[in-house]
Image: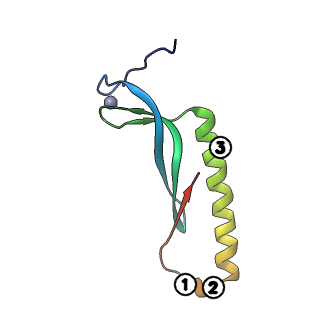
Amino acid sequence: MPKIRKCPECKGIIKPGQTELNYELEQIDVSIRNVPASVCSQCGHAFIDGHIAEDVNRLVNRVAEDINSFSKTHPQMGERHREVAIAI
Ligand SMILES: [Zn+2]
C-alpha cells in the first residue's frame, strides 16, 4: 500500500499529477508542459522527482542549443523576445 504523502506547505494530500516548468534562458523562455510530478490536491504545489528534474534540465539545455543555432542561421527570426513551449 503506497504511503500517503502530505504537503509540507499546507498538509494537503499529494497525488500523482503533472506540472509545467518554466525556464528563462539567455535568449528565450522555455516552458515544459506535462511534466510528471506529485501535486498537492489542496494548494497545487508540485513536487518533482530528482531524476525527472535532471531529464528536463538536459532537454532544456539541448533545446536551447538547437534554438540558438537555428536563430543564427535564420536571422530573419529577428531579435525579439522568443518563447518556446514543449509538451512531453
Ligand atoms: Zn499543499
Q: Is mark 3 within 8 Å of ligand 1?
A: no
Question: Residue 67 in the image: x percent, y percent?
Answer: 64, 69
The three-letter amino acid code for the residue at tag 2 is: Pro
Q: Earlier in the sequence, mark 1 or mark 3?
A: 3
Whether the residues at callouts 1 and 3 have beta carbons within 8 Å, the answer is no
**Which residue matches tag 3?**
55
Q: How many marks?
A: 3
Can you tell which mark lies on residue 75? Answer: 2
Disc 1 element: loop
Question: Residue 79 in the image: x percent, y percent?
Answer: 53, 81
Q: Quadrant of ligand 1?
A: top left
Disc 3 element: helix
Mark 3–mark 2 distance (CA, rounded to whole Å): 30 Å
Mark 1–mark 2 distance (CA, rounded to whole Å): 6 Å
Residue that appears at 60% across and 38% down: 52
Residue nearer the viewer, 43 or 9: 43
Question: Residue 64 in the image: x percent, y percent?
Answer: 63, 62
Whether the residues at callouts 1 and 2 have beta carbons within 8 Å, the answer is yes
Neighbour tally class for label 1: few under 14, some 14-19, many 20 plus, Cα within 10 Å? few
The three-letter amino acid code for the residue at tag 3 is: Asp
Please tell me in which quadrant of the rendered image residue 45 appears.
Answer: top left
The three-letter amino acid code for the residue at tag 1 is: Gly
**Which residue matches tag 1?**
78
Question: Residue 44 in the image: x percent, y percent?
Answer: 35, 37
In the orientation shown, which residue stands out farthest toward the top? 1
